[in-house]
Amino acid sequence: MAPEASEDICEDHVLNGRKLSKKIRSEIRAEVEKLVEKHRISPKLLTVIVGEDPGSQMYVRMKTKASNKAGILSEHYDLPASTTQDELLALVDKLNNDPKVHGILIQLPLPNHIDEKTIIGAMTPLKDVDGFSPSNIHRLFYGGELLSSATPHGIVTMLDAVGLSDLTGKHVVIINRSTIVGKPLIMLLLNRNATVTVCHSRTKDLASFTKQADVLVTAIGRRKSKDDPYFITADMIKEGAVVIDVATPNGDVDFENVKMKARCLTPVPGGVGPMTITMLLRNVVDAYVAQVSGSK
Ligand code: GUN
C-alpha cells in the first residue's frame, strides 16, 4: 500500500495545484485590495510579445486574465517579429521609467536576432517579475530571494503545502538544467537545506538517480517514444516520494501507475501550471510593494 498522502491539498495522492492556486490567489486579491486602499495606485503588469508564437499568446493571455482577477491592471504590447533589439531596448527603457508600471514581463523566446540576455539585463530588477535579471539571480544565490522565477517558486510553494518547507535530510532529484526551471530551482532547494542532484539529457542511467529521490522534479517535456511514452515510470520511483511533473503540455510521468507508489504527485494539467501563474502574481505584488514603499 502507498503511504498516506497529505490531507487537504493532496487528495487520493494527487497534489492539486489548481486548488492551492485558488487559495493563494484569493489571499493575493485580498492583499491587493488593502494595498490599493493604502497607496491609491493599482499594481500594473506590462506584458510584451515579439512575433507570433501561438504558445506565447496563450500563456500571456492566461497571465493577464489571472492578474486582472486578482486586481492587478495589465497592458500588453504585441510587437512584430521584425522588431529590432534597439527598438525593444527603447521600450524597456520607457517601461523602466513609467511609475504606473510595476512589473514587466517579456515573453520568451524572442526572435533569434534579439539577444535575450541583453533585454533581460536592461530591465529594472525591481520590475523584473520573472526574476531572470542578473541582480535577481544574485539575490537568489545569496538566499535573499525577492523576485524569483515563477515555476521554481511554484514548485517550492507546493512543497511547503505538503509540509516540506525544510528539506533537511531530503534528497531532491531535478531532471532539467534550464535557466528558467532547473538552475534557479537548485538554489531555492539548497536554501531550504535539500541535498540536490541534477540530471539532464546527457545523464546516463536516469533510474539510478530517480530511485533515490525523496522528491523528484521532472521537466523533460517530450515523449520517449510512441509506444513507450513516459520517461518516468513507477519502477523508477522510491515508495512514498513526492513527484512534481513540470512538463507541458503532456507530463513526463506515467501518472496512474506512479500515483500508486508516490506519497503525492502533481497532475498535468492542473499541477505546476496554475502555480507558475500564481507565483507571477505574487511577484507583481511584491514588486509593486517594493516600488511604492521605496525599498530596494
Ligand atoms: N517562456 C516560457 N516560460 C516563460 C516564463 O516563465 N517567463 C517568460 N517571460 N517567458 C517564458
Image (cartoon, rainbow, N blue to C red):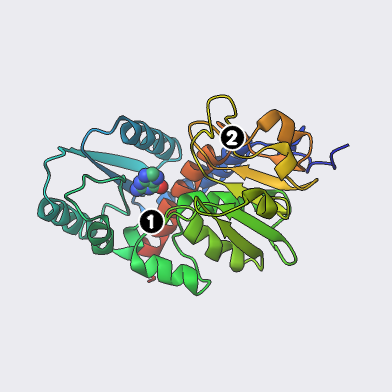
Q: What's the residue at 53%, 45% (across, down)?
A: 219
Q: Is residue 267 in view from this perspective? A: yes
Q: How far apart are marks 2 and 1 (CA)?
A: 30 Å
| Closer to the camera in the image, 292 or 242 | 242
Q: Where is residue 16 in the image (x, y as percent from the top left)?
A: 65, 36
Q: Residues within 10 Å of mark 1 (few under 14, many from 20)?
A: few
- The quadrant holding residue 15 is top right
Q: Residues within 10 Å of mark 2 (few under 14, many from 20)?
A: some
Tell me: 66 left or right of 118.
right
Q: What's the residue at 30%, 45% (across, down)?
A: 109
Q: What's the residue at 44%, 36% (across, down)?
A: 66
Q: What's the residue at 12%, 44% (across, down)?
A: 83
Residue farthest to the bottom, as pictured: 142
| Closer to the camera in the image, 236 or 22 | 236
Q: Mark 2 points at which residue?
A: 18
Q: Is mark 1 on a helix, strand or loop?
A: helix
| Closer to the camera in the image, 12 or 68 | 12
Residue 201 position (above or below residue 273): below
For residue 39, which numbered disc appears in the image?
1
Check disc 1 and give the amino acid type. Answer: His
Q: Where is residue 243 in the image (x, y as percent from the top left)?
A: 67, 44
Check disc 2 and give the amino acid type. Answer: Arg
Tell me: 286 left or right of 8.
left
Q: Is residue 42 in view from this perspective? A: no
